[in-house]
Image: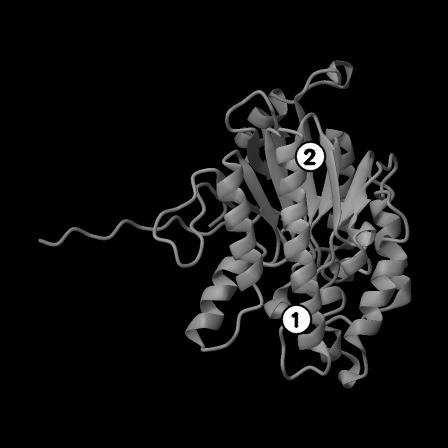
Amino acid sequence: MRRALFPLCLALALHLPSRAAETTDRFSFVAFGCMPYGRENFAAYERLLLEISRQRPAFTVHCGDTKSGGEPPTDAFLGQVRTWFDTIEGAVIYTPGDNEWTDVHRTNNGQEDPLGWLGKIRTTYFSTERSLGRAPIPLRTQRHDPAYAKFVENARWSRSGVVFATVHVVGSNNNNQPDVPGAVAEFRERDAANAAWVRATFAEARTTQAAGVALFFQAEPFNALAAATKAGRESGFTRFLATVEEESRAFAKPVLLVHADEHRYRLEPKVKFPGNAAPLDNVTRLETFGANDIHAVLVVVDPQSPQVFLSGPLIVPSNALPMLPRPKQAPKAKK
């Protein structure tokens, strides 16, 4: 069903600091992903980019999938995506999705090489340790770790005592696909690098006594892990989720997980990790809109607040209102 979300967006906007108050600790960021899917959505996508610039967030993160899985990859489109990112005011940080490289073997009659496109993505977007956008910021990337120097896309930065990081975790079972040549070996190497990066991010947060940590990635890992387990397959998300849970539990301060993949808005506090009956009170996950719902999510970060992260949708007034899932119905009482 469709539901107007403007009141919530307005409430968030009213609490945002003005540019004249940049000396305060409070700031905002925007996240979006799984778009644009097809030329028919380009105009709505460009309206979203203009709305993001109008909000003037401290930074913006695209959580991967810059095209649909059925669209063949091209060098020209890689360049177009970068051009779009560079039209946004402020800094733009990008983490890859499966549609950009993992799944390209499904296009052009199987002629596309996923690892070849992964290399192009690294060259196009991650050649330096700076973000994209009109006002780039410096980033710390995994290229400094001799064991995982090739994973230049894993980036980290901080602001006002809060630590942020991208982690290259993608759909299609995180590329743990035995039927695709070379995929499992690539997955195992990147999976180890991602676990090391998550641990390094929380280590920095502990060292700096950060108020909170936010991680950005493309895949929806919780449902995907459950589906793989039910089907008797090895999940590509087991180590990642176990590492995030262990580090979040030890950190004991607010942790925000921001991802795309399912193309629907989700705000879920007190995340329940696989294999544990009790949810983890300090972890919240936030899922972006996507596909034909061309909108974003807006997060106000207040390091002085016990919650640290206040999240909600960012709706583009000129774009079609998004589809939202119906709330879960309480079970009927037995008579």
Task: Please determine whether, in this image, residue 320 is positioned above or below residue 103.
Answer: above
Outermost residue, left side: 335
Residue at 76%, 68% in the rendered image: 101
Q: What's the mark number on residue 29?
A: 2
- Disc 2, SS: strand
Task: Please determine whether, in this image, residue 257 is positioned above or below residue 104.
Answer: above
Q: Nearer the viewer, residue 152 or 37?
A: 152
Residue at 82%, 34% in the rendered image: 90
Q: Nearer the viewer, residue 249 or 75?
A: 249
Q: Nearer the viewer, residue 43 or 115?
A: 115
For label 1, the crowd category at 10 Å Cα-Cα, with few meaning under 14, some 14 to 19 and many 20 or more, is many
Q: Are marks 2 and 1 in contact (CB under 8 Å)?
A: no
Question: For the image shown, how many numbered marks are present on the structure?
Answer: 2
The answer to which image quadrant residue 231 occupies is: bottom left
Looking at numbered disc 2 in the image, what kind of residue is underneath it? Phe
- Disc 1, SS: loop
Task: Please determine whether, in this image, residue 205 is positioned above or below residue 234.
Answer: above
Percent across and percent down for residue 180 are: 69, 82
Percent across and percent down for residue 94 are: 76, 50
Looking at numbered disc 1 in the image, what kind of residue is underneath it? Asn
Residue at 62%, 41% in the rendered image: 202
Percent across and percent down for residue 126 are: 85, 53
Q: Nearer the viewer, residue 307 or 52?
A: 307
Residue at 60%, 24% in the rendered image: 302
Q: What's the mark number on residue 175?
A: 1
Q: What's the mark number on residue 114?
A: none
